Image: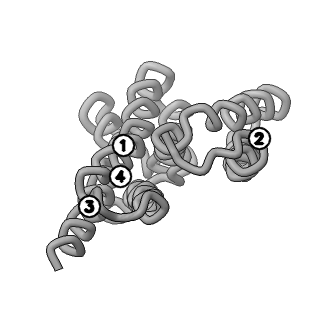
Amino acid sequence: MYDLLNIIIGFVIAYLLGSIPTAVWVGKWFYGKDIRNEGSGNAGATNTFRVLGVKAGIPVIIVDVLKGYAAVYLMQFFIPESWALNTQIYFLIIAGFMAVIGHALPVFAGFRGGKGVGTLLGVGIALYPVAVWFPVGLFVLVLLLTGYVSLASMLGAFSFPFVVIFYTQQENPG
């Protein structure tokens, strides 16, 4: 029972970390704008870059990545060490998923968030720090060639599991 309660607390913390609406807060506090009412209407780093510029976008993407990383990292303290490593890994992945859900549906911003790409990058860095760089490179290449962040994001995210499975052949994260 105690282990289950710890796991639930870890998932709630992961969700709450993901729910930190960085783009919304930066827009309101420093620019007097609700980023969700500008540009694409999305509360994410891409819209922040488009609407508020690089000076606002850089801290937003950094914090968004850190949210995903921190959710996975902190979850380690809520999983019993006696559990099998594969089981622990699944719970780390779920915690990362909870952070991404928090970014997309943030409790602190009326459940109107971003797409979670930056937060997902942080999760990837926490779980597979070497494997994540191929999808990042693919993202940059597609972005430079096409100018479409959404296409670059989708291709980068789609390639990540294949890189983990086929290229690195890692069984355990980190």
User: Height in image: 167 above or below 111?
Assistant: above
Residue at 54 percent of width and 48 percent of height: 172
Q: Amino acid at mark 3?
A: Pro
Give the percent coordinates (x, y) of residue 160.
Answer: 69, 47
Mark 3: which secondary structure?
loop
The answer to whether the residue labelled 4 contacts the one labelled 1, judged by CB atoms less than 8 Å apart, is: yes
Q: Which residue is mark 4?
A: 18
Secondary structure found at label 4:
helix
Residue at which label 1 appears: 67
Q: Nearer the viewer, residue 67 or 78?
A: 78
Q: Determine crowd level at label 1: few under 14, some 14-19, many 20+ residues with C-alpha closer than 10 A.
A: many
Mark 4 vs 1, N-terminal side: 4
> Which of disc 3 and disc 4 is earlier in sequence?
4
Query: Image quadrant for the N terminus?
Result: bottom left
The residue positioned 83% from the left and 34% from the top of the image is 146
Q: Looking at the picture, which amino acid does disc 4 mark? A: Gly
Q: Looking at the image, is mark 2 or mark 3 earlier in the sequence? A: 3
Q: Is residue 102 left or right of residue 124?
A: left
Q: Which residue is mark 3?
A: 80
